[in-house]
């Protein structure tokens, strides 16, 4: 199995040693089309222990999707403006999935289940539907059958080697993932990145199994990808209720800083292109005063808040604040100006700092600003009454865990007395969405591990018996 290293506080990184797929492994392909990257990450969950390992992955740049053809309908675009059609996105997904299987010496029949998720910003339900359809098309064209993208429904359909771990004859999938139920009964999504938040919460709960912090309910999951997503759960049982969601900008803010340094690229791409990931950067750039001044100017443009009533859009996302209010859901967001209006101002600030301080200064600025945003989000949640000493906070996504962001986030939380002991209440983990996809696939098929459960309250046992009773009574 892969050996986990804990850097900073509770960062679940790894020395990659290819995990062995055994008879008790549940193998899932997580396929995600995001604003910056399109990924296929393959995980194997040992159903004896409940722990998930990354078997392999393929990560391609979404902006490398082919250009729309004349006869094709453009249904949307990424945050950075890359135009998408259903067919072009499906082709990119097929390429990503096929390459992931090939590079890891796997065949379609080795995969038990495929979970699709959309990180691409969807400002309408129609656009979200088109993204999901494109993902399905891509997976089908890669050779997966529709059955591998839907639940088994009956115990008899579960693969023989997994039947000992399935509880489909006792409980059915009722929408709860990792012991948390989504907002229900409204007839439509409250926020267009709801599934991302759901997967992030589930994935961070699983990632915590590799460390020494128990991440059960209540919990907060913050996914700092290109865009912001996440979820807040309460104490409820057998299922916790979703009481909060996140949306807005995250990594796109760091990306904006380099748009007049490396046009059209994300910080991720810029560092790869400049080979910066292999060059040790100065931990203390010389122009600290300039960095601090730039940070101050940027933070004046950043708006972190409870999303006000009546909003139908926040940042790049469609939101339904009225529906959120009806079901007791608090929405938290991060915007730049109003709906991204000041992103270009950030580009000017980044270019000015680059001209005076160079690469190290810009990267340190990005780390400072993104850690400030993470801290402000947690502070906002606390002020809204959704955080207490029992709540575990999980952070994933490139804009929350890379560089010096973890270290700075912990320092600022402690210095500002937002959390008394961050190192015992916060985990940082990579591949949160992929891990969450593995968890969702287990939940959809009632593949449980009662000796190492994900659901329930902190310090308490598996909720299987409570679930059985709950489902019989409704």
Image: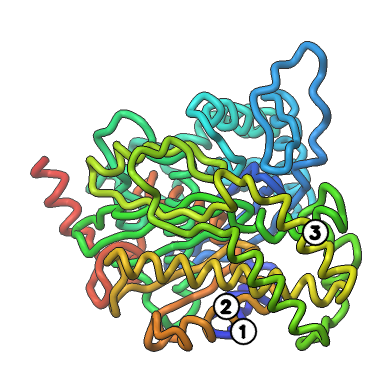
* Residue drawn at the location 28% of the way across and 75% of the way down: 388
Label 1 vs 3, first from the N-terminus: 1
User: How many numbered dots are placed on residues in this image?
Assistant: 3
Q: For the residue carrying disc 1, how many other residues have a C-alpha within 10 Å: few (<14), some (14-19), or many (20+)?
A: few
Q: Residue furthest top?
A: 71
Q: Position of residue 375 (x, y in %)?
A: 49, 72
Q: Position of residue 280 (x, y in %)?
A: 84, 82
Asked which secondary structure carries label 2, the reply is strand
- Can you tell which of label 2 and label 3 is closer to the viewer? 3
In which quadrant is the N terminus drawn?
bottom right
Spatial CA span between label 1 and label 3 = 27 Å
Q: Is residue 217 visible?
A: no
Label 2 vs 3, first from the N-terminus: 2
Q: Are marks 2 and 1 in contact (CB under 8 Å)?
A: yes
| Colour scheme | rainbow
Q: For the residue carrying disc 2, how many other residues have a C-alpha within 10 Å: few (<14), some (14-19), or many (20+)?
A: many
Spatial CA span between label 2 and label 3 = 26 Å
Q: Position of residue 386 (x, y in %)?
A: 30, 65
For label 2, the residue is: 11
Asked which secondary structure carries label 1, the reply is strand
In which quadrant is the C terminus drawn?
top left
Determine whether 12 is above or below 315 in the image. Answer: below
Q: Position of residue 295 (x, y in %)?
A: 66, 71
Q: Are marks 1 and 3 in contact (CB under 8 Å)?
A: no
Determine whether 280 is above or below 226 in the image. Answer: below
Determine whether 77 is above or below 246 in the image. Answer: above
For label 1, the residue is: 7
Spatial CA span between label 2 and label 1 = 5 Å
Determine whether 193 is above or below 16 in the image. Answer: above
* Residue drawn at the location 48% of the way across and 36% of the way down: 318
* Residue drawn at the location 33% of the way across and 37% of the way down: 154
For label 3, the residue is: 258
């Amino acid at each position: 199995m892969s050996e986990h290293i804990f850097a900073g506080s509770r960062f679940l990184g790894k020395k990659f040693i290819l995990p062995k797929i055994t008879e008790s492994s549940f193998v899932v392909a997580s396929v995600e089309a995001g604003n910056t990257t399109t990924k296929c990450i393959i995980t194997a969950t040992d159903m004896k222990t409940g722990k998930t390992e990354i078997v392999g992955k393929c990560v391609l740049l979404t902006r490398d999707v082919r250009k729309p053809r004349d006869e094709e309908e453009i249904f949307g675009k990424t945050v950075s403006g890359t135009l998408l059609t259903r067919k072009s996105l499906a082709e990119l997904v097929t390429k990503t999935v096929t390459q992931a299987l090939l590079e890891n010496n796997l065949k379609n029949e080795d995969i038990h289940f495929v979970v699709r998720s959309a990180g691409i910003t969807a400002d309408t339900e129609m656009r979200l539907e088109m993204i999901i359809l494109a993902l399905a098309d891509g997976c089908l064209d890669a050779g997966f059958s529709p059955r591998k993208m839907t639940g088994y429904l009956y115990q008899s359909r579960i693969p023989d080697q997994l039947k000992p771990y399935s509880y489909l004859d006792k409980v059915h999938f009722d929408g709860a993932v990792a012991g948390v139920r989504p907002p229900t009964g409204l007839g439509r999504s409250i926020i267009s990145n709801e599934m991302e938040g759901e997967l992030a919460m589930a994935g961070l709960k699983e990632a915590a199994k590799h460390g020494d912090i128990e991440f059960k309910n209540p919990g907060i999951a913050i996914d700092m990808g290109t865009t912001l997503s996440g979820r807040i759960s309460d104490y409820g049982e057998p299922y916790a209720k979703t009481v909060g969601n996140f949306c807005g900008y995250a990594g796109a803010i760091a990306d904006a800083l380099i748009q007049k340094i490396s046009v059209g690229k994300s910080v991720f791409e810029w560092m790869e292109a400049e080979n910066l990931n292999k060059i040790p950067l100065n931990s203390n750039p010389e122009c600290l005063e300039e960095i601090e001044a730039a940070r101050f100017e940027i933070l004046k443009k950043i708006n972190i808040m409870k999303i006000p009533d009546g909003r139908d859009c926040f940042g790049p996302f469609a939101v339904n604040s009225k529906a959120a209010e009806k079901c007791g859901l608090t929405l938290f967001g991060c915007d730049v100006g109003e709906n991204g209006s000041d992103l270009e101002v950030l580009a000017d600030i980044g270019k000015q700092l680059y001209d005076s301080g160079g690469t190290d200064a810009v990267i340190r600025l990005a780390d400072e600003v993104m850690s400030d945003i993470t801290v402000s989000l947690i502070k906002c949640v606390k002020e809204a009454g959704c955080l207490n000493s029992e709540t575990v906070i999980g952070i994933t996504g490139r804009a929350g865990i890379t560089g010096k962001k973890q270290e700075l986030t912990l320092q600022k939380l402690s210095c500002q007395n937002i959390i008394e002991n961050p190192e015992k209440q916060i985990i940082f983990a990579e591949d949160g969405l992929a891990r969450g996809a593995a968890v969702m696939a287990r939940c959809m098929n009632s593949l449980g591990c009662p000796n190492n459960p994900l659901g329930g309250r902190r310090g308490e046992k598996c909720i299987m018996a409570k679930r059985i009773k709950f489902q019989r009574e409704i």
